[in-house]
Amino acid sequence: MKTQSLIILALAVVVHSAQTDESKKKDKRGVSFFGSPGGFDIFGVVPSYSSAWAPGPFGPSGWSGSFNADLALGQIQSQATHDIAQQALRDPFPGTPSIAYTPEVLRAVQQAKEANNNVLIAQHRVSEVKQAAIIQQKIALAREAAAREATKRCEEILAHAQAEARASAQQLVSLQQRLATLKDTVAAAQRVAAARETAAAAAIQKNASETAAELRKQDADKQIHQSEKEAKARDIVAAKENAIANAVQQQQQHISKAAYHPWG
């Protein structure tokens, strides 16, 4: 029972640690995280970046470069929590019976961990799209200002700048739509993680119940065997005592006969 409680607690800590780390890091991601587009992510909606991208001249960047360090720390904490859960599976507490977990139990725990990792990845991508939307909004505002300035010079420059502003606005709308889609993905991943954690807890409970029943059966068999051994030992002692008593009685009868007939 203690081992089961420790495993369930470790799974809860994994989920809580992933969500806490993501909430702390979502305000620290900035322009320095993005690089030149190198394709699209696994969802096919957000450009992937391969190298660092310097911030534009539209104002100071509000994000530091400590995101990678925070992400690494969160991964280390999550891995440490997972190692504790795995150690609890391998090393039971002293004084408790050893529980051999079935492959189904271990697979359920592994699936719960993978689901939690999927939640963390999805939340990470939501934060990336949020930052991209903010950057695109700043670009759109800057281009609108440039369009207003261009009206003082010529109509051609004005038309071009307005076209760029409309394109930026369309990109902003597209990113907002993608953000909504990724939020739905996060919610779905969280539901899957919760379901798999419930399945893992049920599998552990079932395994513990089966192990306890087997241990009770073994104890009952052992007690029956011990009782049979004790009964056999008592029978042997009783037989020896009867044999000794018979021998003593026969000896006494022989002595009595010799006393009444001393001549033989």
Image: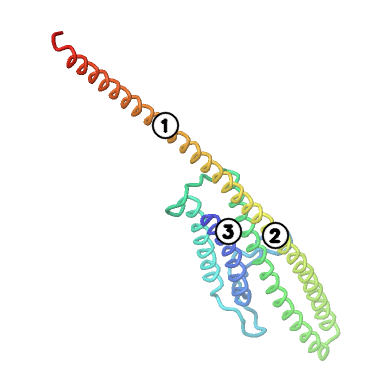
Q: Earlier in the sequence, mark 1 or mark 3?
A: 3
Q: Which residue is mark 3?
A: 8
For residue 198, what is the image quadrant? bottom right
Q: Looking at the picture, which amino acid does disc 3 mark?
A: Ile
Q: Which residue is mark 1?
A: 231
Q: For label 1, count other residues whose C-alpha is less than 10 Å away and answer few (under 14), some (14-19) or many (20+).
A: few
Residue that label 2 marks: 189
Q: CA distance from mark 2 to mark 3?
A: 19 Å
User: Which residue is at the far top?
Assistant: 264
| Outermost residue to the bottom | 152
Measured as percent of width and height from the top left, residue 253 is found at 24, 18
Please provide percent x and percent y for residue 165.
80, 78
Give neighbour class at mark 2: few <14, some 14-19, many 20+ (Cα, 10 Å).
many
Q: Is residue 238 above or below residue 64?
A: above
Q: Is residue 64 above or below residue 175?
A: below
Q: Nearer the viewer, residue 138 or 8?
A: 8
> Residue flagged by tag 2: what amino acid is it?
Ala
Q: Identify the residue at image location x=82%, y=91%.
A: 152
Residue shown at 66% from the left, 66% from the top? 123
